[in-house]
């Protein structure tokens, strides 16, 4: 995977060069009046016959768990940053799936 576009504090685009996917993913972060919005897009084609068979059975769940962990860690970092600033206490964010 290679980072092909980076806009600090707002966007990361990664392109899959080898492995399971051919394609790219985008993670966008934007400030809103009521909090922070995070959008994730995955544009891909699965490479390899075996991977195409395993994707709906096992690999999709593994991929989703990895993305969920990344987004959870991102939310933790945002809360720490928020709590470090002056102002009200940051709200608790539930831990999805015990990540």
Image: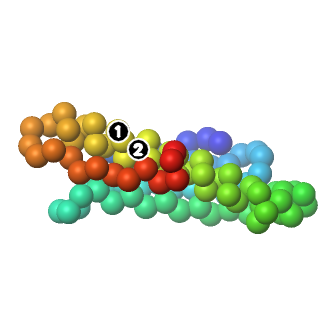
For the image shown, how many numbered marks are present on the structure?
2
Q: Residue at x 62, y 63 (%)?
A: 43
Residue 27 percent coordinates (x, y): 47, 54
Up the image or down, 14 lies above or below 31; here it is above
Q: Which residue is mark 2?
A: 74
Q: Is residue 26 left or right of residue 66?
A: left
| Local SS, label 1 | helix
Q: Is residue 92 left or right of residue 14?
A: left
> Is residue 8 among the parts visible in the rendering?
no
Within the image, what quadrant is residue 32 found in? bottom left
Q: Is residue 57 left or right of residue 3?
A: right
> Is residue 35 among the parts visible in the rendering?
yes
59 and 8: which one is in front?
A: 59
| Local SS, label 2 | helix
Up the image or down, 12 lies above or below 85; here it is below
Q: Residue at x 83, y 59 (%)?
A: 54
Spot the residue most to the front: 98
Residue 23 percent coordinates (x, y): 67, 57
Q: Which residue is mark 1?
A: 77
Spot the residue most to the left: 87
Q: Residue at x 17, y 62 (%)?
A: 33
Contact (Cβ within 8 Å) of mark 1 with mark 2: yes
């Amino acid at each position: 995977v290679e980072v092909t576009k980076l806009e600090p504090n707002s966007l990361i685009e990664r392109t899959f060069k080898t492995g399971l996917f051919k394609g790219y993913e985008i993670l966008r972060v934007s400030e809103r009046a009521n909090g922070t919005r995070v959008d994730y897009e995955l544009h891909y084609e699965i490479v390899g016959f075996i991977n195409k068979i395993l994707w709906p059975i096992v690999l999709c769940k593994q991929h989703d768990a990895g993305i969920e962990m990344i987004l959870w860690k991102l939310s933790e970092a945002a809360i720490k940053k928020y709590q470090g600033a002056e102002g009200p206490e940051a709200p608790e964010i539930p831990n999805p799936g015990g990540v």
